[in-house]
Image (cartoon, rainbow, N blue to C red):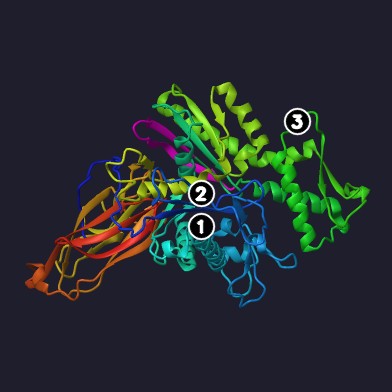
Amino acid sequence: MYAPQQQNAGNSAFNAYPQPTTMNTQWPAGQPQAGFNQQPAAQNPASYGLAFADTTTAGDPQVTIIQNWPSCGNQSLSQVPTEIAYTSESDIQPSWGYDIKPNLTILKWFKLFLEYPDEQIKELCELPPGKTMLDVTADFLGAMYRHAIEQLYLQRGRPVMEITQVDFVLTIPAVWNELACMRTRQAAERAGFTKNHTLNMCTEPEAAALYTLRSSEASANAGDKVIVCDAGGGTVDLISYNIRRTHPRLEVDEAVVGTGDTCGSTYINRAFENFFKTRLGRHYDLRVAQQQRVMRNFEEVKCGFRDREDQETYSVVVPGKNNIPEAGIVDGEFEITRAQMRGFFDPAIDKVIELLAEQVSQLNLLDGGRSNKQVLLVGGFGQSPYLYKRVMEWAKPQGINVLQPKDGHVAVVKGAVIRGLDMAGPQQGSVSDPTRAVWVRKCRKHYGTLMISHFIPGQHYEEDAFIDPVTGLKMAANQISWFVYKGADISDDKKISQQFHRTFRKTTLWEDTLVVCEDDIPPTRMTPQVKVICKLTADLTKHSKRIFDVQYGWFRKVFTCAYRVDMTLRAGYMTFELVYKGISYGAVRVELQ
């Protein structure tokens, strides 16, 4: 790939303007949109939720939460624990969620490890023999997929479902890296979510914001800044939005790049579990079923904790243990003081408030602190009364409003369905649809391609220099052409094109290397800070050389090709495509962060 004729040359960032998307897929009997998210519930340290909407019915599609799960009886539960257990190494359909037998070893919190390389995962957690973290995730998602399809068949009937297209929207933490996004998609594909379906991805805070801002609770006006704090089991994601307009349709842009950290409610559970084991000491001989019961009992205490001055102690029932005074167990109950409860919560909440303060600080830099601001607490952990109290104590002196929206624990999964409806068509999500929300996001990283440029003394490094054997010209290898810059505004279906040029004698497979960089100012050449994400391969070997232009260099006949690479932004991902004379010769998909 040779030096591009950059269509956006001179711009420090690519400015993308919001464009509505239209999907042209035809559906014989309409289309349910299934939102699928990895959001923790108040009842469980880490949980998944499922919801769907049917576009075949008259009026606005209603979002339905799936509330029945294997082995949960008649209880209506909006989410299922992110837990899985294998009975043997060859177990192809392991137990999951509420269906796990008490005597089995449970794997949980595995979502948190998707960002780590396989070698590091082996050091951090123990996996079943022959299983990788991707295998475990795919097995769990496979169980979720089968349950989702089963519920759709039960609620809509086999005749209707057999002629109905089902599309899925999968939500992910906003702060995940490319490795975690790629593994999540790979696991979802192996689980069946792309088998005769379309699978789109959306960040959790964006889904939560979409649901909440469309509800009547978030009384945001044009010009207001809304900080969505999606506090879940593993991660807490924050993104600040600027409300451009609310009527006739919602138009929102990301005010500053989102942030997040692994400070969710699972760390409160771990803090209690470590404290409990230490207090019991030699008396800690609980069976697996007893341990699970203790943690479920603690969940009830945790979810109701308000740090009230009139309640100084809290009790967690410990099955099988009656009186162990030195361990704090009296009449089968483990006593926890109010101060100890704060000690479990405060490290995680302190980090949440630190993240909120960072967002507010960046917003104030943009507008001098003049805009109205509100914080939306969503997600399972986001419904904690104590978290709300602490955030209110921090926000009130600054004039910032704090809301805990109704259904906040399912805001992500409901928002994912709405996102799917916005992308559907032609009824919903078309350019003319006044209800379709328009989102403009901030790009988290720089994305570009490696290229070879004509060598310019004083600009290029001699270590990158070489003589092109075809043209005899001095060239510079390992240079980078950036398509989109970190912090740039991006929106769905926006296309960026760059022109490139190749000179060759024989037609071979062409490979263009796609790269990413997180530094604020990206380098112009390959450095350790630039990471390769994938290759774009194009095959023109089957075509006659007559389609190429001819030149003569170094007294020999050579072929030249002026082509372009199109980068198209989609919901949650981007595609790179090599186009020559209007024909696509190769494309690759990259999960967008």
Which residue: 41% across, 25% down? 367
> Which label lies toward us, 1 or 3?
1
Q: Nearer the viewer, mark 2 or mark 1?
A: 1
Q: Give the crowd class for mark 3: few <14, some 14-19, many >=20 residues within 10 Å.
A: few
Residue 64: which disc? 2
**What residue is pinned by disc 1?**
155
The picture places residue 257, in percent across and down from the top left corner, at: 43, 40
Q: Residues within 10 Å of mark 1 (few under 14, many from 20)?
A: few
Q: Which residue is mark 3?
A: 308
Q: In front: mark 2 or mark 3? A: 2
Q: Residue at x 80, y 63 (%)?
A: 287
Residue at point 38% right, 42% down? Answer: 441
Q: Residue at x 33, y 60 (%)?
A: 28
Asked if residue 80 lies left or right of residue 528, the reply is right
- State the residue in front, 248 or 126: 248
Residue contact between numbered discs 2 and 1, judged by CB atoms under 8 Å:
yes
Check disc 1 and report its element: helix, strand or loop: helix
The residue type indicated by label 2 comes to: Thr
Q: Is residue 260 magenta?
A: yes
Q: Between marks 2 and 1, how big is the CA–CA gap?
A: 11 Å
Q: Main secondary structure of the magenta part?
A: strand
